[in-house]
Amino acid sequence: MPARTLPANSLAAELDRAAAELTPKLVAWRRDLHAHPELGNREVRTAGIVAEHLRSLGLDEVRTGVAHTGVVGLLKGARPGPVVALRADMDALPVAEQVDLPFASKVRTEYNGEHVGVMHACGHDTHTAILMTVAALLAGLRARLAGSVKFIFQPAEEGPPEGERGGAELMIAEGALKNPEPDVIFGLHVTSMLQSQVVGVRGGPLMASADGFKISVRGRQTHGAAPWRGVDPIVTAAQVVLGLQTIVSRQLDLTHEPAVVTVGAIKGGVRDNIIPDEVQMIGTIRTFDEPMREQIHARVRETAEGIAKSARADCEVCIKRGYDVTVNDAALTALMRPTLARVAGAEHLPPMPKVTGSEDFSCFQQVVPGMFFFVGVTPPDKDASHAEPNHSPRFYVDEAALPLGVRALAHLTCDYLEAPESLRRLD
């Protein structure tokens, strides 16, 4: 089968010129959003700014209130053609910012019953600002577009508050991918794992599935001076934590796919001389393969329950399936990779390893062919391997990298819209 070669779109020069002209607005939007972060399903101010911006561009349709606070805009080109969807997430994290910036977040709010700081510690402020800029850029060229572009601004990618639905799954349920249905969808994520001006993409599995677990170990409370008169759930829980680590290191074939089992929190007891009745722990499971995912779920249960039984304790294991694996359509990625190479430069498109973080962009990819990629934001004078990671209170974005995200999404869109139908068939 001959290799697919996708030519550069006819608007390439105009896209780059418009991206440069819009950069001051891009940075201003990003800084405003960064200073006013909002948690999942609460992105009221952000959604209002986005909706007003899209309406000001004269888009053919702007829907609000999708999946609580989501915004969907539709831009119809002057000529018929395929439909490309572009997605950006808008929510922040319950993290108190520690970066010394004039536009650093000072916001505090309630989250699951706790008073917390709020920060765009994962860079969703940049995603929103980038897609706002792409919308402005493409709206200015609509007379030369062959096809339509759907702009999806999504809430709650980091997960909705307890007891609520949200995110990509709810956006899809409420019609974000309908009227019209996209032929493909593209999305990006900034990351400190890569240097500024570097892009990372791979076909097939890119980001892991993410499942949460809660393990309750119940013993029998007693005086700390007489542990033999009770059943110690703290010691038992410690053995469970260690036992869980052998699942990945000793029970899985890691030559097939990587996996992670992490205990993120453990709670039990109130004072030094009381052995409590119960200890609870919560954690996450990351996998790239569905059979391995099921295998780990079974091993977590067997390990925790078996260790607890050996200590005469009771154990309850609850595992909640979360986001599925983010899988880039292999044919679409092969088709569009040359676009990213032209935009970033081939030397700035190194091989991208799998990432054990997760993304609900995977929900969109289960409906239409999709490609998700990374844009590096670690300044060139810093080592990306030692940069503060996404979700850190010290996560820092080199704003000089943001125009690359704009150009990447714009060129991907226009390259695909102008591609011959024979190349757009991904079978």
Image: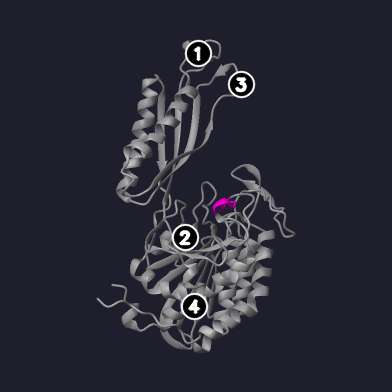
Answer yes or no: do the residues labelled 1 and 4 have beta carbons within 8 Å?
no
Other-residue count near label 1 (Cα within 10 Å), few / some / many at <14 / 14–19 / ≥20: some
Please indicate, yes or no, whether residue 217 appears anywhere in the rendered image. yes
Position of 73 with respect to 146 (left or right) is right
Whether the magenta-drawn stretch holds residue 229 is answered as no
The kind of residue tagged 1 is Pro
Judging by the rendered image, the residue that carries numbered circle 3 is 271
Can you tell which mark lies on residue 168?
2
> What is the spatial separation of the Cα atoms under label 3 and label 1, in whole angstroms?
14 Å
* Few, some or many residues within 10 Å of mark 3 (<14, 14–19, 20+): few
Circle nearer the N terminus (4, 3) = 3
Give the residue pinned by disc 4.
411
Q: Please name the predominant secondary structure of the magenta segment in the image.
A: loop
Tags 4 and 3 touching, CB below 8 Å: no
Local SS, label 4: helix
Q: Tag 2: residue type?
A: Ala
**Label 1: which residue?**
227
Q: Amino acid at mark 3?
A: Arg
Residue 58 appears in the picture as rendered = no
